[in-house]
Amino acid sequence: MTARTETAVRLVILLAIGTMAGAAAFTHVHDLSVAHGQPDWIGWANAVAVELMTIYLGLELRARRRAGRPVGLIGSLLVAFALLSLAAQVAEAEPSVWGWTVAAVPSLAFLALVKVVLSNAPVTPPAPAPDQPPGDWYEAPEQATTKPERPADPVPPAVPAPAAISAPAAVLPPRGVVPSNRPHVVGIIR
């Protein structure tokens, strides 16, 4: 089986399970809303809100992971809406362990699909802001060390060298690298 065929089969399976799980969850939320006194149109509105919010939050979670943004709140909301859907399905079931288990299958299948799809999202670090210098500008350059073939004869200096005060090279970026539209630091002269 080629990789393209395998991807197509996986997509068909994903869509089939997602559609069936969504339809079952949608129906259970609607029926539970109507059974507890809500008008029919509000039952449909509740079902749409709960099920589409779950799908939207899954997509938002994936987008935030790709962008390297925090996902804690979105993940918590996704779990909350999935549990709300699960509760509606279990409430509509026959009051037995097997009734609850069978009724929970659509929501659990949907949660499993979301987990599988989201675990395939590549996590990439965010790109640096365009107005910020890359981090390696401020790192100390590696010093090349070479050993002389023979030890040098110590020669005392004839005149002591004056103490020079200069900024270390590791603090400043190379010349010509800082764009002209960047503010200049007052007090540093090259």
Image: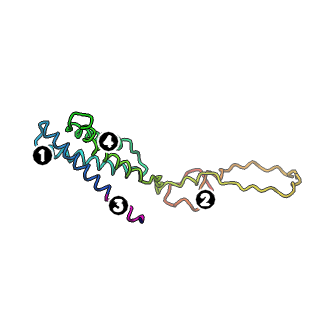
Give the x, y percent position of residue 61. 36, 48
User: Which three-letter amino acid code belongs to the residue tagged 2?
Assistant: Pro
Q: Which residue is mark 2?
A: 174
Left or right side of 144 for 185: left
Q: Which residue is mark 4?
A: 77
Give the Cα distance between marks 3 and 1: 37 Å
Q: Which residue is mark 3?
A: 9
Going from the N terminus, do you reach mark 3 or mark 1 first?
3
Give the Cα distance between marks 2 and 4: 47 Å
Residue at (32%, 41%) from the top-left corner? 79
Which label lies toward us, 2 or 3?
3
Q: Which residue is mark 1?
A: 41
User: Which three-letter amino acid code belongs to the residue tagged 3?
Assistant: Val
User: Which three-letter amino acid code belongs to the residue tagged 4?
Assistant: Leu
Q: Dots 4 and 1: beta carbons under 8 Å? A: no
User: Which three-letter amino acid code belongs to the residue tagged 1?
Assistant: Trp
Q: Quadrant of the N terminus?
A: bottom left
